[in-house]
């Protein structure tokens, strides 16, 4: 069962985080930055000084677009610590069991992973290059969007699709100041598009059309990532576009993590609000 495998994988990564905290920095979404000798995050430069290493999606670490969806807040980090992964996994289980039974294991897993990447790609475009983003919420918001579309087709709605979608959108807006709304929105849009593909694919060629559409969605996300990477590289080569940074400056930024959905999962799972 793909849902069980995904939940198990998330908890396995969390166990690795507990044993070695650097796992978070290694797998989180980071667009374009440098890691200094003190492990601080710095603005990139055309020629990094000795001891500074460029990191991020813009520097070939494309895997971060996916691995960041399996990383969660450590126990000693506010606001929720370990509740972050618990709420997310509860939501994954709640939507995953229903959707996997409806569309099958392979299509469900493909949709989940594509939604995760969709959320990361929007983060790649709209968040600061040195900001880190983590969490499974982009993928979970994708499941919400897909569930909303498919529930209309199958006339099977045990979770209350409209209520769940409204709650997700409200949370996306209300929590935009302290959560990764970019990841939520990107995942939600990707999930809705996938749901429409699954819903309206002609019955006679359903498998072929759905497969081709999923490949096309992936191609669009890859192309968008390549375009953004090119823009970031151009800005590195042009010091005037880097906030007035001169060639000899090394500018440090705080190591803040943009948490990708803790409270949304709490609300969507039907749990009472609170910290």
Image (cartoon, rainbow, N blue to C red):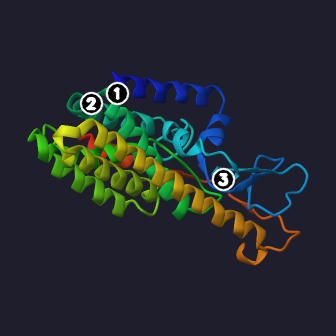
114 left or right of 154 in image: right
Residue 6 location (% of width, % of height)? 41, 28
At a point 24% along the width and 33% down the height, the residue shown is 103
Foreground mark, 1 or 2, reads: 2
Name the element at disc 3: loop
User: In the rendered image of this protein, does residue 243 appear above or below residue 187?
Assistant: below
What's the CA distance linking mark 1 and mark 3?
A: 32 Å
Residue 142 location (% of width, % of height)? 34, 47
Name the element at disc 1: helix
User: In the rendered image of this protein, does residue 3 appear above or below residue 67?
Assistant: above
At a point 31% along the width and 52% down the height, the residue shown is 193
Picture disc at residue 3: 1
Q: Is residue 112 visible?
A: yes
Sequence-wise, the earlier of marks 1 and 2 is 1
- Mark 2 burial class by Cα count in 10 Å: few <14, some 14-19, many 20+: some
Q: Between residue 67 and residue 249, name the one nearer to us.
A: 67
What's the CA distance linking mark 3 and mark 2?
A: 37 Å
What's the CA distance linking mark 1 and mark 2?
A: 7 Å
Name the element at disc 2: helix
Mark 1–mark 2 contact, CB under 8 Å? yes
Foreground mark, 3 or 2, reads: 2
User: In the rendered image of this protein, does residue 265 appear above or below residue 121?
Assistant: above
The residue carrying mark 3 is 255
Q: Between residue 259 and residue 205, name the one nearer to us.
A: 205
Q: Between residue 3 and residue 200, name the one nearer to us.
A: 200
The residue carrying mark 2 is 100
41 left or right of 24 in image: right
Residue 167 location (% of width, % of height)? 25, 54
- Mark 1 burial class by Cα count in 10 Å: few <14, some 14-19, many 20+: many
Q: Quadrant of the N terminus?
A: top left
């Amino acid at each position: 069962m793909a849902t069980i495998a995904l939940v198990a994988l998330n908890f396995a990564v969390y166990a690795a985080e507990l044993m070695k905290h650097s796992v978070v920095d290694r797998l989180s979404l980071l667009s374009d930055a440098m890691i200094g000798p003190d492990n601080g995050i710095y603005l990139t430069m055309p020629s990094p000084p000795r001891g500074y290493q460029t990191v991020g999606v813009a520097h070939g670490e494309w895997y971060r677009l996916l691995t960041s969806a399996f990383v969660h807040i450590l126990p000693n980090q506010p606001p929720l610590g370990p509740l972050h992964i618990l709420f997310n996994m509860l939501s994954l289980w709640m939507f995953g069991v229903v959707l996997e039974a409806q569309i099958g294991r392979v299509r469900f897993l493909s949709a989940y992973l594509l939604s995760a990447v969709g959320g990361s790609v929007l983060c790649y475009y709209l968040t600061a290059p040195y900001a880190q983003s983590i969490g499974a919420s982009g993928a979970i918001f994708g499941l919400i969007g897909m569930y909303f579309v498919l529930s209309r087709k199958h006339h099977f709605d045990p979770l209350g699709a409209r209520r769940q979608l409204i709650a997700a959108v409200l949370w996306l807006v209300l929590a935009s100041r302290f959560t990764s709304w970019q990841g939520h929105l990107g995942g939600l849009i990707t999930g809705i598009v996938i749901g429409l593909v699954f819903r309206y694919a002609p019955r006679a060629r359903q498998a072929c059309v759905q497969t081709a559409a999923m490949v096309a969605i992936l191609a669009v996300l890859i192309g968008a990532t390549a375009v953004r990477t090119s823009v970031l590289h151009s800005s590195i080569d042009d010091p005037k576009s880097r906030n007035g940074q001169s060639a000899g400056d090394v500018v440090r930024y705080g190591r803040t993590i943009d948490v990708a959905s803790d409270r949304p999962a709490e609300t969507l799972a039907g749990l009472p609000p609170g910290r």
